[in-house]
Image: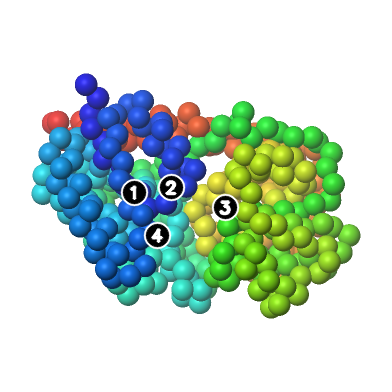
């Protein structure tokens, strides 16, 4: 009989659903979706917490392990109740849970009420599973307000063990694409607020586009409401196209028509879109933030300062690269982040907790 694993998550993103499907081959998985759409009021939050408590009371007595995606309010009850029963809890760190960019009010540690809850989870979980090493500790950079980021910057004296387990990618899902491509710079993100726009550095990309009129720029994933706001406040030049969100299955064809993929985020984890675009042969340009330089390495370019002139200079260099750079970008993701690595290392981490529990 497979051990029972309780799987708790906030957002049913592709990486979360990938883990859920993969773990079902190794465990009897019991998922709980702490649906954020229902917690926009104190009453909604209370109802979700009551539902979670009832679920935990039913499932924990037979559970061998608990795994949660992201450190936030949805993991407080699981950690507290599992500790009382001696059930190990592992938590995946994705990015939002490891930072506070005060000028953007972005990150769990920017919230007066969520920050102490996150600290409780960090200090009382059994094992932390960051998708990038820099989520634990990242030096100050101009991109992040010139202050250190990462969990250790916000949870002093943290002693909970951690194990880096990156997300993984299937190369068959993300084909390499043609070597010769038009002069197109793209970025992909669900841009549904101005905070997200600035977190993803799209304001800098729009400004840079004005200095490269011969190059086509496209931002994929901008809601219609945000498109209106961007046109009003940022006045993008004629060579910029704003495109509404598309299904994930449509992205490989979009990446294959992209020369340079830009990830100019001020805040990030290990960005899935960047890694997927690199698999498709896009030459990456990114900021020195969290998992971005870890993914890019020597296969692309880093913009050291959040200044339009610096972005323009680096984009020009990337647009001049030949097809060998496309092969290099794909090869780096194939080597560092294969899907098999995610499966193997995540299961190994969870099995180590089972061994500790079983003595």
The N terminus sits in image quarter: top left
Observer-side mark, 2 or 4, equals: 4
Q: Secondary structure at mark 4?
A: helix
Q: CA distance from mark 2 to mark 4?
A: 12 Å
Question: Can you give x and y, in whole percent of width and height, for residue 137 in the image?
Answer: 42, 58
Q: Name which of mark 2 and mark 4 comes first in the sequence.
A: 2
Q: Is 124 placed left or right of 196 in the picture?
A: left
Q: Residues under labels 3 and 4: Cα distance?
A: 29 Å
Which quadrant is home to the C terminus? top left
Kindly state the secondary structure of the residue where label 2 is placed: loop
Residue under label 1, please give it. Answer: 33
The residue depicted at 17 percent of the width and 50 percent of the height is: 54
First along the sequence among labels 2 and 1:
2
26 above or below 125?
Answer: above
Q: Residue at x 14, y 46 (%)?
A: 57
Q: Which residue is mark 3?
A: 292
Q: Position of residue 36 (x, y in %)?
A: 38, 59
Q: Position of residue 162 (x, y in %)?
A: 33, 47
Alpha carbon separation for disc pair 1 and 3 = 28 Å
- For the residues labelled 3 and 2, the Cα–Cα distance comes to 23 Å
Q: Quadrant of residue 309?
A: bottom right
Q: Are marks 2 and 1 in contact (CB under 8 Å)?
A: yes
* Residue under the point 64% across and 35% down: 174
Q: Position of residue 109 (x, y in %)?
A: 37, 68
Residue 216: in sight, yes or no?
yes
Q: Which mark is residue 37?
A: 4
Determine whether label 4 and label 1 are within 8 Å by CB: no
Residue for badge 2: 12
Of marks 1 and 3, the one in the foreground: 1
């Amino acid at each position: 009989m497979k051990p029972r694993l309780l799987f708790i998550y906030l957002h049913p993103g592709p990486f979360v659903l990938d883990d859920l499907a993969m773990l079902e081959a190794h465990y009897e998985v019991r998922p709980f979706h702490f649906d954020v759409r229902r917690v926009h009021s104190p009453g909604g939050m209370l109802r979700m917490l009551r539902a979670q408590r009832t679920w935990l009371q039913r499932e924990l007595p037979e559970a061998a392990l608990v795994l949660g995606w992201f450190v936030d309010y949805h993991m407080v009850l699981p950690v507290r109740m599992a500790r009382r029963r001696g059930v190990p809890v592992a938590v995946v760190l994705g990015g939002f849970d490891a930072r506070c960019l005060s000028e953007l009010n972005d990150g769990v540690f920017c919230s007066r009420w969520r920050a102490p809850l996150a600290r409780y989870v960090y200090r009382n979980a059994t094992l932390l599973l960051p998708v990038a090493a820099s989520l634990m500790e990242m030096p100050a950079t101009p991109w992040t307000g010139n202050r250190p980021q990462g969990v250790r910057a916000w949870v002093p004296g943290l002693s909970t063990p951690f194990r880096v387990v990156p997300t993984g990618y299937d190369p068959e899902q993300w084909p390499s694409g043609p070597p010769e491509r038009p002069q197109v710079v793209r970025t992909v993100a669900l841009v549904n607020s101005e905070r997200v726009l600035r977190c993803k550095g799209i304001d800098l990309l729009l400004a840079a586009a004005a200095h490269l009129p011969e190059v086509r720029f496209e931002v994929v994933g901008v809601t219609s409401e945000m498109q209106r706001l961007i046109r009003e406040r940022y006045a993008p030049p004629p060579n910029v196209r704003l495109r509404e969100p598309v299904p994930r299955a449509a992205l490989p064809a979009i990446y294959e028509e992209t020369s340079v993929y830009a990830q100019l985020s001020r805040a990030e984890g290990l960005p899935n879109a960047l890694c997927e675009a690199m698999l498709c042969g896009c030459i990456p340009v990114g900021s020195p933030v969290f998992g971005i330089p870890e993914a890019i390495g020597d296969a692309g370019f880093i913009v050291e300062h959040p200044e339009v002139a610096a972005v323009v200079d680096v984009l020009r260099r990337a647009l001049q690269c030949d097809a060998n750079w496309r092969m290099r970008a794909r090869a780096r993701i194939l080597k560092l982040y294969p899907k098999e690595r995610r499966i193997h290392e995540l299961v190994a981490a969870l099995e180590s907790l089972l061994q500790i529990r079983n003595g």
